Amino acid sequence: MADNNIKNNDVKNAPAKSGNKTEATPVSNDVAVQEQRNENLSTDHGTTTIDDTVVAKIAGIAAREVSGVDSLGGGGARMLGSIRESFGGSEDVRQGVNVDVDEGSANIDVAINAEYGVAIHELAEAIRRNIINAVERMTGLNVEAVDVTVHDVKLPGEDDDDQDEQQAISQNQGR
């Protein structure tokens, strides 16, 4: 009777009974390795490695394309961005985007500021769809998750405050 107790981890399919003995087919580790391989990036002729910064740029641009997104990043990231721009630097499209690329797949975190009046749950879903489509199409990576964090809602008339802040920063740097 002890011979009939077989753990599920040791068999590929349910055991087939033949008389008094139970036969089992062991699971091959090759199956798990084949499932993890991203055929878009690993071929018989070589592999393609895509850096996190590349995926972050694609995701940042894709998130900004969605109607209802005011800006990306939390308050600190936006402040650093405005300082960088006041020194003549260009906008960092990776601002507010964190990416982890591993084994042919990507996990993406996006921090946004939404425009007032937008249904935030619908906005988050639209951001996810746009980022997943852009990243998978352009890189061949499998996007496992896109987590969206909403840090703020831009109220009507707040543009004037943001412009005043940027002008004050520019004036202070000119002294």
Image (cartoon, rainbow, N blue to C red):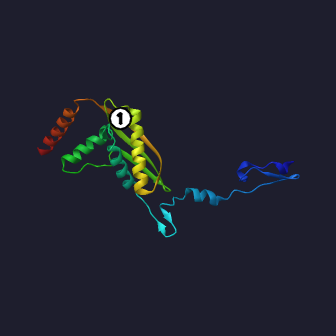
Quarter of the image for residue 28 reads bottom right
Screen quadrant of the C terminus: top left
Question: Residue 147's image quarter?
Answer: top left
Tell me: 11 left or right of 63: right
Q: Give the crowd class for mark 1: few <14, some 14-19, many >=20 residues within 10 Å.
A: some
- Give the amino acid at mark 1: His
Q: Name the residue: 42% across, 49% down.
A: 133
How many circles with numbers are drawn on the protein?
A: 1
Image point 59% across, 59% down: which residue? 33
In this image, 148 relative to 95: left or right? right
* Residue situated furthest left in the rendering: 175
Query: In the image, is 26 to the left or to the right of 44?
Result: right
Q: Residue at x 63, y 60 (%)?
A: 30
Give the residue drawn at x 33%, y 35%.
114
Q: Position of residue 168 (x, y in %)?
A: 16, 38
Asked whether 158 or 125 is in front, the reply is 125
User: Nearest the camera: 54 or 166?
Assistant: 54
Quarter occupied by residue 171: top left
Query: Which of these two is toward me, 166 or 47?
Result: 47
Give the image location of residue 110, x and y in percent: 38, 43
**Residue 99 image position (x, y, % from top left):** 41, 49
Q: Where does residue 11 sit, x and y in percent of width and height?
A: 73, 53
The residue that disc 1 covers is: 151
Give the camera-side residue of 32 and 99. Answer: 32
Q: Is residue 12 left or right of residue 31?
A: right
- Residue 39, placed above or below residue 22: below
Q: Secondary structure at mark 1?
A: strand
